[in-house]
Image (cartoon, rainbow, N blue to C red):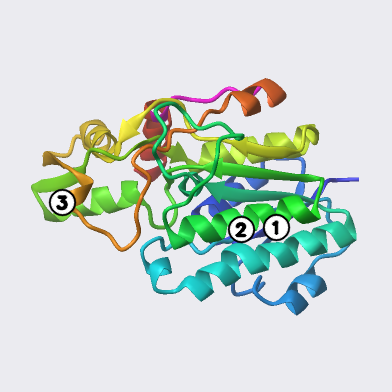
Amino acid sequence: MKTKVLVTGANGQLGQCLQLLASQSDFEFTFFSSASLDITSKKNINKTFNASYNFCINCAAYTAVDKAESEEDKANLINNIAVKHIAEACKQHNITLIHISTDFVFNGNAKQPYTEIDETNPLSVYGKTKLKGELAIKKILTNYYIIRTSWLYSQFGNNFLKSMLNLAKKRNKLSIVNDQIGTPTYAVDLADVILELIKQNNNYGLYHYSNNGVASWFDFANAIFTKNKNNIKLEPIPTSAYPTAAKRPHYSVLDKSKLINNFSIKVPKWEESLDKCLKALF
C-alpha cells in the first residue's frame, strides 16, 4: 500500500514545491488549494479528511505579516482555529500532521540560534496566531511534526527573491534593511525535508529547519544581484528607516541540530540553495 498524503495550501510556494517533488516520490499525493478546500470550514475539513490518508501536510497559512495587524480575526481563523480543526480531523482518522510554522514566534532578542526549547514571545499578530496554531496541535495530537522555518523563497509565488529581481528591472538603486538577521530558506529544500520525515515516520515533535548560514536582508539581496549579475547599487539601511505595520524579530537564526541528529539530514548552505533556485528560474 502506498503512503497517502493530503496537502493543504497547494498553490502556495511550499505547496508548489511539493507538487514539483511529488512525481519523484513513492507517495500518493492529493493536493488541495484554498479554492478546493476551505480550511476555515470545519464541515469541509471533516468531509475531506478520511482514514485513507496517512499524512496531512498543512501548507495553508495567512502570511501577510503587515496586513495581519489590521486583520487579526482573519489571521487567527487561518493560523489557529483552522489548524485546530485540522488537528482534530487528523486525530479522528489517525493521520500524522506535518504543520509549517515560523521564526516569527520569537522576539529576536537572542544572541545565538534559537532551539526548539527556547522561550517564544512573538512581536506581531502573525507570530502570535502561528504560535497559537502550534499550541493547538500539541494539545490535540501526539503524532505530529511542527516545522518552524524562516525567510522562505522559491521559483513559485511571491517572495523576497522575486521581488528583488523585479525591482532590478525598474531601478538602479535600492535601500535594503541590514539589521534583521536570519537565514533564507529555499522552499524546495524544505519540501525535501518534509518527504524525508514521511519516509522515516518517527521522532515526532517540534523542529527547526532553514538553510545553513546567517544573513541580513541586505546580504541576501546582495547575493541575489551578484549571482544574477544585476548592475544595481545597494544601500544598507536600519529597520528604523523602513517602518512596517508589524514588528519583525531582529535576530531569528534557527538551530537545526535536533532535526539533523534525529533524521540524519544534510542542510545546504543558503548561498548554494540560492544558486539552485536561480537556475530553476532562468
State the image coordinates of residue 43 (x, y, percent, origin top left).
Answer: 77, 78
Residue type at the position of mark 2: Lys
Q: Taking 258 as reference, is 141 above or below it?
A: below
* Mark 1 neighbour class, 10 Å CA radius: few under 14, some 14 to 19, many 20 or more: many
- Please indicate whether residue 173 sits to the left or right of residue 68 in the image: left
Residue type at the position of mark 1: Ala
- Please indicate whether residue 124 sits to the left or right of residue 238 in the image: right
State the image coordinates of residue 142 (x, y, percent, origin top left).
Answer: 82, 46
Q: Nearer the viewer, residue 228 or 177?
A: 177
Question: Hey, which quadrant is residue 192 in on the image?
Answer: top right
Q: Which residue is mark 1?
A: 136
Q: Taking 23 as reference, is 80 above or below it?
A: below
State the image coordinates of residue 174 (x, y, percent, origin top left).
Answer: 13, 47
> Which is more N-terminal, label 1 or label 3?
1
- Please indicate whether residue 230 sits to the left or right of residue 57 in the image: left
Question: Hey, which quadrant is residue 112 in on the image?
Answer: top left
> Which SS class for mark 3?
helix
> Does the stretch in magenta take in 144?
no
Q: Residue at x 19, y 50 (%)?
A: 240
State the image coordinates of residue 84 (x, y, percent, origin top left).
Answer: 71, 63
Disc 3 to disc 1, C-alpha distance: 37 Å
* Mark 2 neighbour class, 10 Å CA radius: few under 14, some 14 to 19, many 20 or more: some
Magenta segment:
264-270
Q: Which mark is residue 241?
A: 3
Badge 2 vs badge 1, beta-carbon distance below 8 Å: yes
Q: Which residue is mark 2?
A: 132
Q: Nearer the viewer, residue 247 or 57?
A: 247
Disc 2 to disc 3, C-alpha distance: 31 Å
Q: Residue at x 34, y 43 (%)?
A: 282
